[in-house]
Amino acid sequence: MSMVEKAKIQDVPQIHRLINFFADRDEMLPRSLSDIYENIRDYFVHRKDERVLACAAMHIIWSDLAEIKSVAVAEECQKQGVGTALVDACLEEAESLDIPTIFCLTYQPAFFKKFSLSEIDKMELPRKVWTECFRCPKFPDCGEVALIRHF
């Protein structure tokens, strides 16, 4: 069995709980159930039996831009390569779709630097990226770090 697979619709409640567990600790931004359902095709998961233990999403923004988001790994699975496998799956999918640039906004920049993403000023990101930011309760003082990679 592969460590990473595409999420299924029945995974949504577990993905929601996993992301919001870390969001409640201010370690990442929360996601609503409706947002996850609407974007379920963006998600990859790592599961054991029927239990989702980790997730990550690759969201297409425009013809030349995608975002890695909602990377969450249950505490019992951290430091075992699960997060790395999920981000690799996101990067591979973006590359296979010929999307030349991928970025992320994160409180964990050191993790993403392992994937050749480089820190940039958030203001350098295209305006299209900010549509979600404007709806966020932490805007404009979120403290997330922007990183980007060009293939």
Image (cartoon, rainbow, N blue to C red):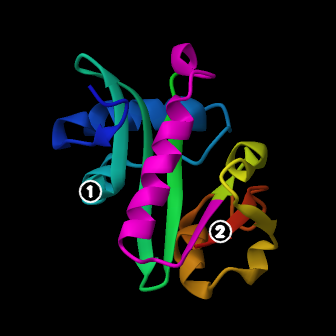
Residue closer to the observer: 73 or 136:
73
Q: Pointer 2: what residue?
A: 149
Answer few, some or many: residues within 10 Å of disc 2's Cα (few below 14, many 20 plus, some between 14 and 19).
some
Answer few, some or many: residues within 10 Å of disc 1's Cα (few below 14, many 20 plus, some between 14 and 19).
some
Q: Is residue 69 above or below residue 95?
A: above
Magenta stretch mostly in which secondary structure? helix
Residue 146 in the figure: left or right of residue 94: right
Mark 2 is on which residue type?
Answer: Arg
Give, as a single range, the part of the protein colored magenta. Answer: 75-104
- Residue found at x 41% / y 77%: 98
Is 114 on the left or on the right of 49, as rendered? Answer: right
Q: Residue at x 37, y 30 (%)?
A: 3
Residue type highlighted by circle 1: Arg
**122 part of magenta stretch:** no
- Give residue 73's position: percent from left, percent from top: 52, 29
Residues under labels 2 and 1: Cα distance? 22 Å
**Label of residue 58 in the image:** none
Q: Nearer the viewer, residue 1 or 74?
A: 1
Where residue 140 sits: x, y (%)? Answer: 74, 68
Q: Position of residue 63 (x, y in %)?
A: 42, 86
Residue 27 or 78: which is nearer the viewer? 78
Q: Is residue 90 magenta?
A: yes
Q: Give the SS element for disc 1.
A: helix
Q: Which mark is residue 41?
A: 1
Q: Residue at x 68, y 80 (%)?
A: 125
Q: Nearer the viewer, residue 13 or 75?
A: 75
Residue 14 percent across, percent down from the top left: 33, 30
